[in-house]
Image (cartoon, helix red, strand yellow):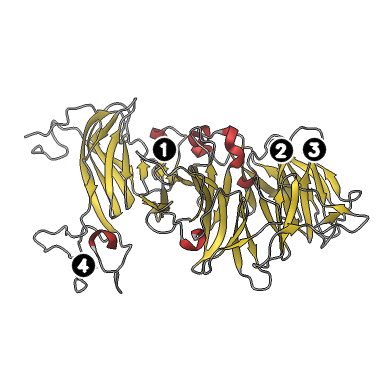
Amino acid sequence: MSRWGYSGPGEDVLREDGDAGFLGMDMDSPSENLSPGWAAGLINKRIENGVAMTRRGCAAVVQFNAEPFGKILGHGTWKNPATGVQFLLVAVVDGVFAMREDSYPVKIGLPVGQSLAGPVVFEQVFQHVLMGRGIAQTLTWDGDLTGQFNFLPAPTLPTIAIPNTRVMLAVADRLLVVHGRDRVAVSDILQFNQYDVALFDFTVNEGDGDELTRAMKWVNKTVLLFKENSVSGFFNFSGNMAGAYIDSISDVRGCVAPKSAVRVGGDVLFLSKGGVYRVLQVIQDRTDVADVSASEKIRPLMQRVNWDAAAGAAAAVLGKYYYLAVPVDGSATNNAVAVLNTVSGAWESVDYYGNENGVGVKAGLQILGFEEVEWMGEPKLAMICNRANGLGCVLLHECGQFDYLGGTRWHVIDQVRTRAYSIGSKGFKGFNRTRIGVQTWNPFISISAIKPGVAERKGLNLIITRDRRAYFTHARDEYNPADISDDANREKREDYSVLPAVDGEWVRTGLWTEREQESIEALEIRELAESVAMEITGSQGRVGVKFVTVEGFEKQRDTKTKV
């Protein structure tokens, strides 16, 4: 350091830039134009009180995977109206598994000679579950775990049988089904197997060549009817259907993926061509589709979507998060999940599972969709998947520290890429160093500085790890994980992770198994550039990025140390 410190005669003024915490990510705007708190990219992260923290893992818990699955063909839920007990339903070629937290999976059979050849959907109507099989006859199950699925009972004349379908909705004590490309049949009240074709058969935008793919309940006795290029509303849908009518909501935006449409508060989010859009209740008794995409800030991800396979995209809402699974980078199945915080309105992450964003062997996970289940008294998402080997699995979403898929434990590889820091001026600057506050659990961290240009990347460290036996303070004896008399919560230990299979640590009362340590990493940059962004990658454990600062000189200069 010079005799004058950071400024003085013959010296340039040292400036600082950075983020005191994080709000979300903006992948679309120029990185140098982002406001403080906005990251240019977040992978496998959640924002927890301003800290960009590694997401939780996914677990193939035994209650949902005790029976080996073949290829999964559909999924849904059934709740017993008498007891309130809910089951997760998973369809395979020769039956349906009914599963819940505290019991062994039960397989519900099919009628003699029947098997499932293609995708199926489930819809609960009163105590019954209907299985839609497209052009094949709809099946029904009465909730008896010792029974089986059966064909629908014959209708009572002069009504006729409700059409076969893969698009159905139980609403207002009736069953609404889509048949053909643009027709909607509504069953008799309290009779899901039959309807009056003269009174309750409707057409939606007849002749436009667009196919109806989704019906969903909304506000004010309204059912939304989604086509690929338009959205309509079935208004005044009530028990007696008096005054019911169908009208257009949008002729310019439609839903390309039936399972992507979900309610978020008073709105409905859905995947349309090019991005995610909202159905809005603009004012009372008036609806509209927003002109501006809700996914503007993740436009680069939307540009990577394989739109030829986007019909299988699926979404779910749990708590404050909206999860959207999409196929990216040429994949024919969903292999990435975009995560939106519906409270802050910020996209917080793009999630990958089973090393899909890492180097080396990948799990080949194919995400079919999500279902809300109860786990240990709390709502959780079950993520229903097939794998590249043709076998299905059900994963408990955001549970534990690792992704457990197909008997293999995968580390969650996460990353923060900050905005470009220019320390408040244009032109070239000499960037000296960075300080990064981290919150870690068994970490493996690499940090790089990114300059404008092609492949302008400089690694700033070898690898940052933490030793659960060592302390930051000098000359302190090592912690012995296998010694139950030792104090596992003693201050200033480098890492407080608990890995019994690795070092024989006793899991015992008072042991905080997920405690995270906090520290500051100070690294030299020593680069001349207009701006610099920091990229922090965690390859194992959990890595929370609390803040990032960079220091540099406003004008071009040699950043070597003076004597």
Whichever of callouts 4 and 1 sits on the residue coming sooner in the sequence is 1
Q: Which mark is residue 205?
A: 3
> Could you tell me which quadrant the N terminus lies in?
top left
CA gap, disc 4 and disc 3:
70 Å
CA gap, disc 2 and disc 1:
34 Å
The answer to whether residue 438 of the structure is visible from this angle is yes
Residue at the spot of label 1: 34
The amino acid type, in three-letter code, at marker 1 is Leu
The amino acid type, in three-letter code, at marker 3 is Asn
Whichever of callouts 2 and 3 sits on the residue coming sooner in the sequence is 3
Q: Residue 424: x percent and y percent? A: 32, 35
The amino acid type, in three-letter code, at marker 2 is Ser
Q: Nearer the viewer, mark 4 or mark 2?
A: 4
Residue 552: quarter of image:
top left
Residue occupying the point 68% across, 38% down? 254
Cβ–Cβ below 8 Å for labels 2 and 3? yes
CA gap, disc 2 and disc 3:
9 Å
The amino acid type, in three-letter code, at marker 4 is Ala
Q: Nearer the viewer, mark 4 or mark 3?
A: 4
